[in-house]
């Protein structure tokens, strides 16, 4: 199993550009989520999904969209990048919403200039 | 007040030392508790869940005190490889985890 994969590993965007961060898991997990990690802030939940076709907002959803058309994939779209979105983004998956263990991808380091 | 609070450290300890971290949480309805470990520039990984009666996993012991709303992690016989950031994580009634900012541990020879 590859576990949770994320692409790209690094990305530099200009303000106003859009892009999609890819996330995939091959563990047949129902629950998937996106976090951002900033110095001194801890991981903050952006969006999450409890199954294909179902998504919901987390703590910091503004400026991001998600969709979950398959169990495996959970892309995160930045609609119009802003410098405040400079961060490290982690995708995670879990067998169920009980979240007894979350498996994280390796992260995407995004810089918006 | 943050929902989950941790001392950021760093805790600098020699090999072989015992070190303990505490974490406090604000929501008394929190149901599940975890410690995750995050190495520098890597993703978090589950270290252990924390059970009401306390639990051990080798050199690691986790405790939960619901009355005072804190959890703790004790590491005995510290190894160089234990150097990392330890994240306290709490789950409430919703399908979401709340992460602390982490406590950094540096073990020196």
Image (spheres, coloured by chain):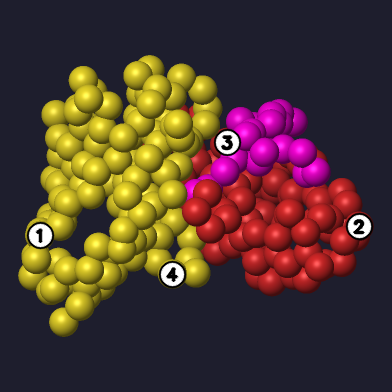
Residue A68, percent from left and from top: 74, 39
Chain rendered yellow: B
- Return the mark for residue A54: none
Query: Which residue does the numbered mark 2 point to in the structure image?
Result: A16
Chain letter of the residue carrying label 1: B
Q: Is residue B11 above or below residue B14?
A: above
Q: CA distance from mark 2 to mark 3?
A: 33 Å
Q: Colour of chain A?
A: red
Query: Which residue does the numbered mark 1 point to in the structure image?
Result: B18
**Residue drawn at point x = 32 percent, y = 49 percent:** B7
Task: Mark 3 vs mark 1: tell me if same chain.
Answer: no
* 2 vs 3, front mark: 2
Q: CA distance from mark 4 to mark 3?
A: 28 Å
Does the magenta run of residues contain A20? no
Q: Which picture quadrant has residue A61?
A: top right
Q: Are marks 2 and 4 in contact (CB under 8 Å)?
A: no
Task: Mark 2 vs mark 3: tell me if same chain.
Answer: yes
Residue A8, percent from left and from top: 71, 68
Residue A8 appears in the picture as rendered: no
Residue B100, percent from left and from top: 42, 44
Which residues are drawn in magenta?
A42-64
Chain letter of the residue carrying label 2: A
Q: Are marks 3 and 1 in contact (CB under 8 Å)?
A: no
Label 4: which secondary element: loop
Query: Which residue does the numbered mark 4 point to in the structure image?
Result: B40
Residue closer to the observer: A19 or B86 = B86
Residue closer to the observer: A98 or B96 = B96
Specify the quadrant that holds the C terminus of chain A. bottom right
Label 3: which secondary element: loop
- Return the mark for residue A30: 3
């Amino acid at each position: 199993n590859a576990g949770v994969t994320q692409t790209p590993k690094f990305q530099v965007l200009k303000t106003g550009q859009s892009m999609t961060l890819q996330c995939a898991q091959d563990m047949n997990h129902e629950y998937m989520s996106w976090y951002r990690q900033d110095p001194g802030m801890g991981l903050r939940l952006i969006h999450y999904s409890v199954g294909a076709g179902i998504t919901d907002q987390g703590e910091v959803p503004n400026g991001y969209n998600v969709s979950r058309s398959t169990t495996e994939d959970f892309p995160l779209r930045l609609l119009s990048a802003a410098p405040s979105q400079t961060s490290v983004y982690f995708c995670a998956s879990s067998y169920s919403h009980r979240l007894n263990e979350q498996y994280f991808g390796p992260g995407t380091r995004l810089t918006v200039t | 007040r943050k929902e989950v609070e941790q001392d950021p450290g760093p805790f600098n300890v020699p090999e072989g030392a015992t070190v303990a971290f505490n974490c406090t949480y604000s929501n008394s309805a929190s149901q599940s508790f975890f410690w995750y470990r995050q190495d520098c520039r890597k993703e978090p990984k589950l270290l252990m869940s924390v059970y009401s009666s306390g639990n051990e996993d080798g050199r690691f012991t986790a405790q939960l005190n619901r009355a005072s709303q804190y959890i703790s992690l004790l590491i005995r016989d510290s190894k160089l490889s234990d150097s990392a950031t330890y994240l306290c994580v709490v789950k409430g009634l919703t399908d979401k985890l709340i992460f602390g900012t982490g406590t950094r541990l540096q073990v020196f020879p």
